Image (tube, rainbow, N blue to C red):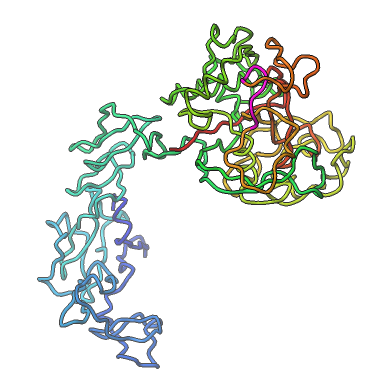
């Protein structure tokens, strides 16, 4: 048969004897007409061996023949051959090959000369002058029998079929092999919805996927951005226990509650994704011309610029106001990774407009709490695979024979596995997604490149007690809002002036390819002024789900 659907029932085998084609019976003999049939409950005649039960009986899971009760034929077993008709009569399942019980889907005969129904009720291929199977030029039919007459039965709508030119189509309710089922819809590209017309072809009306399912994924409108994972709100313990190897002094544990769900990138933002929105500019300083490697060597301000660009590209209101006149963003460009803004109005504007960064509509940097919640993925160790060993925490060199951090090596690129063993000088960035994701589907939350987060850095994280804190963000300082403690801010640099208790930095998380194991922990946190950039610092974006 030419149709793809025919393969479901019309299985025939050809063999040659002295150059002559000989017909072979189709697989699946008609049980009702089997020459040796088991009677009900007979131990000496297992129907699994003979493949047959006498008329009115069916082979059960215990290999015995028995009656099958029914109210409609839907409760009866499927027929063993296209020549067999199954029906419900007097409360029990029956089967027959006699004429007059033609199923409703049987259509007008189509070139039956090469198909025959044998006396047993099995469909067979008649001997023909050559070894070619009988042709069927209707791809949405399949072989069937009404008694001793072969027919072409229409297959179920939605069955795959072969169209002219070799393209794969779908069978519609009238038996046509069309491109799509009339009335069905799909999304194409990022957001455009197409509808299948009466002629079985896609029509593009220009209607977009709309909220709360604004994205296109595998032909359906969905609520999660492509390449992102959706996380539900929840509680977790933020920080590290006092005895954790490699622990810093600003990681005191506290219970955290996140009140809003959010989606987060399954990987760091790649160079390819950055260049798509940056007019081809690539600020990366470690490995360039690697579209699947993380972008790095960017300022905190440049990360905000990219987040705004992605929001605009996907139809969301940007989260950040980077107006040069209002905020003083006059030094560098986000596309080149060197944007620096000086004005303190930015933070107040954002807070006043949205009620906090988590209330904005578009893409943004995660808060520290969101980042650690995602990195832990429901676990409590230093990494989601467990705790670190005592080696390679602060030593100057890695072991020369093999890395020995079983809770880190399979999931993170770090100093002892990102380059040549025993040679830290060869450490380098790697393409995203190459190592195992955490239980929530997120790759390299630890290692490869550090990731900017939203919060201002404060070394006073130990102020938290074991009382749940909701959506905690360290208050802004420097050019992002509230001034440094006890001092004015140097708005040109983002640092506190002389005498201030702490610099006005921004937090970065996760560890990098050139750092040792103590940096590659879920609780590890560091901060630098937002104007800083270096070739192991990148970003990962989030978006609040509504």
Can residue 524 be found in the magenta stretch?
Answer: no
Q: Residue at x 53, y 29 (%)?
A: 356
Question: Looking at the picture, how far across and down is residue 365, in whole percent?
Answer: 58, 29
461 displayed left or right of 185: right
Q: Residue at x 72, y 41 (%)?
A: 523
Q: Give the answer, above or below, for where 142 lies relative to 276.
A: below
Q: Quadrant of residue 187?
A: top left
Task: Please say whether residue 366 is visible from this viewpoint.
Answer: yes
Judged left or right of residue 199, residue 209 is right
Count of all numbered marks drawn on residues in the image: 0
| Extent of the magenta region | 474-481
Residues 298 and 2: in front is 298
Quadrant of the frame with the C terminus = top left
Q: Main secondary structure of the magenta part?
A: loop
Residue 111 % position (x, y): 17, 55
Image-quadrant location for residue 304: top right
Percent from the top left, x then y, of residue 117? Answer: 21, 69
**Residue 226 horizontal/vertical position (percent):** 48, 35
Residue 482, compared with residue 83, is above or below; it is above
Farthest residue, direction left: 100
Q: Quadrant of residue 100?
A: bottom left
Q: Residue at x 52, y 17 (%)?
A: 321
483 sits left or right of 23 in the view? right
């Amino acid at each position: 048969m030419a149709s793809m659907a025919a393969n479901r029932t019309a299985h025939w085998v050809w063999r040659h004897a002295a150059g002559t084609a000989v017909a072979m019976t189709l697989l699946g003999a008609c049980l009702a007409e089997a020459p040796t049939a088991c009677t009900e409950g007979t131990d000496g005649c297992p129907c699994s061996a003979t493949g047959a039960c006498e008329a009115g009986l069916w082979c059960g899971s215990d290999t015995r023949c028995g009656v099958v009760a029914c109210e409609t034929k839907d409760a009866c077993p499927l027929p063993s051959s296209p020549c067999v008709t199954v029906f419900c009569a007097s409360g029990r399942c029956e089967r027959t090959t006699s004429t007059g019980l033609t199923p409703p889907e049987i259509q007008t005969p189509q070139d039956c000369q090469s198909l025959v129904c044998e006396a047993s009720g099995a469909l067979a291929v008649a001997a023909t002058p050559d070894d070619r199977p009988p042709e069927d030029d209707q791809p949405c039919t399949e072989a069937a029998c009404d008694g001793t007459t072969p027919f072409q039965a229409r297959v179920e709508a939605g069955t795959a079929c072969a169209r002219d030119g070799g393209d794969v189509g779908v069978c519609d309710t009238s038996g046509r092999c069309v491109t799509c089922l009339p009335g069905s819809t799909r999304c194409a590209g990022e957001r455009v919805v197409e509808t299948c017309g009466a002629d079985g072809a896609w029509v593009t009306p220009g209607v977009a996927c709309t909220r709360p399912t604004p994205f296109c994924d595998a032909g359906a409108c969905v609520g999660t951005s492509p390449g992102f994972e959706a996380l539900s709100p929840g509680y977790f313990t933020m920080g590290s226990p006092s005895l954790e190897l490699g622990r810093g002094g600003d990681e005191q544990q506290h219970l955290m509650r996140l009140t809003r769900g959010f989606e987060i990138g399954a990987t760091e933002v790649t160079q390819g994704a950055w260049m798509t929105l940056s007019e081809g500019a690539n600020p990366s300083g470690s490995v360039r011309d690697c579209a699947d490697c993380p972008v790095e060597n960017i300022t905190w301000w440049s990360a905000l610029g990219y987040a705004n660009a992605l929001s605009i590209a996907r139809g969301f209101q940007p989260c950040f106001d980077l107006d040069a006149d209002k905020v003083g963003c006059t030094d560098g460009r986000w596309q080149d990774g060197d944007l620096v803004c000086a004005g303190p109005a930015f933070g107040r504007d954002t807070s006043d407009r949205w009620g906090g960064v988590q209330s904005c509509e578009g893409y943004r940097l995660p808060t520290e709490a969101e980042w650690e919640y995602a990195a832990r993925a429901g676990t409590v160790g230093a990494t989601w695979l467990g705790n670190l060993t005592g080696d390679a925490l602060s030593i100057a060199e890695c072991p020369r024979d093999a890395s020995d951090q079983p809770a880190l090596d399979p999931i993170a690129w770090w100093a002892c596995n990102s380059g040549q063993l025993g040679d830290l000088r060869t450490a380098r960035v790697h393409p995203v997604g190459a190592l195992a994701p955490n239980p929530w589907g997120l790759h390299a939350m630890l290692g490869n490149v550090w990731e900017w987060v939203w919060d201002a850095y404060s070394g006073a994280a130990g102020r938290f007690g074991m009382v749940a804190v909701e959506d905690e963000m360290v208050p802004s300082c420097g050019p992002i809002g509230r001034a440094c403690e006890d001092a004015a801010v140097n708005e040109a640099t983002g640092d506190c002036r002389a005498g201030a208790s702490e610099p006005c930095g921004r937090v970065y998380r996760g560890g990098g390819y050139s750092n040792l194991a103590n940096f590659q922990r879920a609780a590890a946190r560091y901060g630098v002024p937002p104007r800083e950039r270096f070739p192991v610092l990148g970003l990962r974006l989030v978006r609040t789900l509504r």
